[in-house]
Image: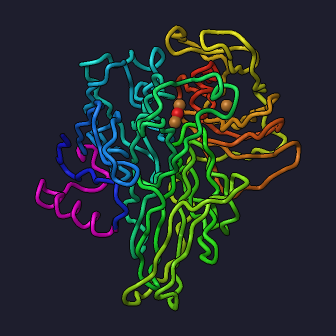
Amino acid sequence: MLKRVHLGALPSNRLRAAFGVVGTALALFGVACISPPAESPFDVVEFELVAAPSTVPLVDGRQMEVWAYDGQVPGPTIRVRRGQTLRVRFTNRLPQPTTVHWHGVRVPNAMDGVPGVTQPQVEPGESFTYEFAPPDAGTFWFHPHVRSSEQVERGLFGVLIVEDPEPPPFSREEVWVLDDLLLARDGRIAPEFNTRHDLAHDGRWGNVVMVNGERAPTLEVKPGERIRLRLLNVANGRVFVPDFGELEPRVIAVDGLYAKEPVAWGGFEIAPGNRVDLDLVVPPDAGGRRFAVQDRFTRRPFPIAEIAVSGDRVETPAFPAPARAAEPAWGAFGESAPARAELRLNARLGGPLGIEWTINDEVMDHAHDHAKTGRYALPRNEASRLRFVNDSYRLHPMHLHGMFFRVLSRNGVAVDEPFSRDTVLVHPKETVEVGVVPADPGLWMAHCHVLEHAEAGMMTLVEVR
Ligand code: C2O
Ligand code: CU
């Protein structure tokens, strides 16, 4: 189903050494075409992407009925190099309309996949071609923006990796797609979506936790290897805080972009939508050992994965961790940047689902709100402050499309995160202030990434001009 024009898409439903995969892709590249210069606009990477009901091995290899991109869950991992243009010919073979949203990527507004705002929804049997040149290297992902609480849960998500033109020489690369799934007693994906329970809480939390579609898989590594581990959370509502125990990875990128400097791994909350890239050096003397990776967000820690060390020792490449490679221009935020908006987050009874999640007492609904103007305005290339005020007792990972932001304070206390984000977890009753310098004009969504909250109205539009 996948057309390999330049680089191939990679099955991501197995833990595997991406080093070999990159090699394969490069070989394909050499075979498939005469390699154009890295920044050439004619360097187009083309994919066919089809969303359709499918049966795939998932959760301990059981055959499960899902909705999948290209017949796999997680969907294909798309890799492009910064400077290349990605063209995705998408076809909808689902029983519902859908779109593809490129989470975190600064796409031209018309490619953002927001139904009724940036494009009409793609009806069953129809196609839509997405084309853009990702301006930032990093770990991104794609998912539907129509009935996402159902469509993402059923299996529609995939990883988009934008490579640096000269990637740092890690000994290998791994991607861990963190997810959970709510299975009914009969072992199938529980077919009731947007339940009253899920709406009244932090969305749909599953009873099975998976990494790349498997329960607590084992990653085999060699002593001394230096691994770039890309983590992303595609769950509807669950937050992950992976604890690597004695292994001491450093955070080199958050939500795609490199950090200013590597940060010690200190229990980062990977909320739905967030990505974190880790620089993980396997201790050279750890041969024969196994390290448990446990989740610490919930009260009772549980295993997410295991890292097993065996085989011959590998020389760890010595290179400085990548930092601040391609980043949008940041102005000085400080107190001087004007506060443009306060977004108060709350819930009320009512609406088609019985509970509505509101931003400043308003709801948005993709099915009916085909807005052509933003509810909030941000001037392009200027520093602005935005404030999220959580008036509720639930979690709200707030996500902005089309731009990155920096967290400036939590509950009035300044924080100095040396990285930017596109999604920030706002805790119950918490106030989070962010600074942003939007570079790309258009109508961009701001919404909660607890997908049930978004479905129940917790979305709005920010206009950059
Ligand atoms: Cu991944 Cu509108 O979001
Ligand atoms: Cu929310």
Nearest the viewer among 255 and 285 is 285
Q: Is residue 341 visible?
A: no
The outermost residue toward the front is 185
Q: Looking at the image, which residue is at 52% across and 8% down?
A: 368
Question: In the rendering, at what x and y percent does residue 118 appear?
Answer: 45, 20
Q: Is residue 391 visible?
A: yes
Quarter the N terminus occupies: top left
Q: For the point 70% across and 38% down, which residue is it?
A: 383
Q: Is residue 218 above or below residue 416?
A: below
Q: Is residue 362 magenta?
A: no
Q: Position of residue 443 (x, y in %)?
A: 54, 22
Q: Is 19 one of the magenta-colored residues? A: yes
In screen coordinates, is 180 left or right of 259? left
400 is higher (above) or lower (below) than 11: above
Q: Is residue 390 left or right of residue 35?
A: right
Q: Quadrant of residue 12?
A: bottom left
Q: Position of residue 405 (x, y in %)?
A: 65, 42
Q: Point out the stretch of residues depicted in magenta.
A: 17-43
Query: Relative to 205, is 313 on the left or the right?
Result: left
Seen in the picture, residue 78 relative to 98 is either above or below; the reply is below
Please state, as top left, top right, bottom left or bottom right, where the C terminus lies in the image. top right
Residue 24 on image: x %, y %:
21, 64
Q: How many marks?
A: 0
Q: Residue at x 48, y 64 (%)?
A: 229
- In this view of the protein, which residue sits in the foreground, 40 or 97? 97
